[in-house]
Amino acid sequence: MPFPTRSGSRAGTAGRGCPAKNAETMISAVYYIFLVLLCTFFMILSALALVVCYPFDKGRRVVHELSRILVRIFFAVPPRWRQRVIGREYVDRKKSYVIVLNHNTVIDIPTLYYIPLNFRWVSKREVYKVPFFGQYLFLHGDICINRGRATEAMEQLLREGKLWLSRGASVAIFPEGTRSKDGEIHRFKAGAFLLAKEAGVAILPVVTEGTNTLIRPNGLFNWGNRITIRVLPPVPAERVAAEDPHVLMQEVHDAMCSALEEIRRK
């Protein structure tokens, strides 16, 4: 018969604190499985919609609306998740924009679907290799660029971005070019602003806060998470055409930084 030891006693004590953690792990695992099944269903539905609707829906509005429904389900099922949209009145659904938003995590992408616009993402090539996510980007018609070839990437951004804007869609870009590791908004790159100028459209700045806390570092969901989406007043197409893109870039950057600080204070 084995004798109890101090280490065994500590293990037993620690074990009593594990059920809650195990339950949280189990709930997150179940929700991940639910999301895989949900994404599979909507991916099939989106593929069918693309084939059926493409002849009269060059802007892929139907596919985009299916993505919005998917996102709504994703955020709606957990009862304590909250999303707050500020500044929705600045969005004109009849217009096309170059949307610029800060980037902290992959959750920024579904969060933008709370903005009532038909838009296409500009994403790095590596994202297309992610299971489910990459296939969705393909069906959605998003712009895939190779960041390792800057000149080619810029040419592709301008060419495909102007194509989608001419079809009545907006184009969404992370102007920082990569994720922020500390949650702050860092230096912008000029691509989004050059696209807006060449296409003759307004720039719509959007700031998000709370997306980087929805999934914890251990991969489990934070079931009490809060996300704020703040839409800033757009920069009119006339100003975009008249101003130097780099001057405008700095102005929008500073406005977004100020908006992020205001969100955090409230």
Image: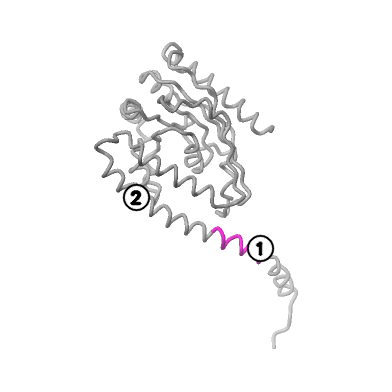
Give the residue type at disc 1.
Ala
Number of marks in picture: 2
Q: Quadrant of the C terminus?
A: top right
Q: Residue most toward the left?
A: 55
Residue 82 in the image: above or below residue 254: below
Q: Nearer the viewer, mark 1 or mark 2?
A: 2
Which residue corresponds to the image point at 61% horizontal and 27% vertical from the top-left? 259
Cα separation between marks 1 and 2:
37 Å
**Label 2 near label 1: C-beta < 8 Å?**
no
| Mark nearer the N terminus (1 vs 2) | 1
Where is residue 92 drawn, in percent x and y? 46, 25
The answer to whether any part of residue 29 appears in the image is: yes
Which residue corresponds to the image point at 74% horizontal and 77% vertical from the top-left? 5
- The chief SS type of the magenta part is helix
Q: Is residue 2 left or right of residue 183?
A: right
Q: Is residue 32 left or right of residue 128?
A: right
Colour scheme: one colour
The answer to whether any part of residue 144 appears in the image is: no
Tag on residue 200?
A: none
Q: Quadrant of the N terminus?
A: bottom right
Q: Which residue carries the number 1 mark?
A: 20
Label 2 CA crowd tier, 10 Å (few <14, some 14–19, many 20+): few
Give the SS element for disc 1.
helix
Looking at the rendering, the stretch of residues picked out in magenta corresponds to 19-28
Where is residue 216 drawn, in percent x and y? 59, 50
Q: Residue most toward the top?
A: 242
Which residue corresponds to the image point at 55% horizontal and 25% vertical from the top-left? 232
Give the SS element for disc 2.
helix
Q: Which residue carries the number 2 mark?
A: 45
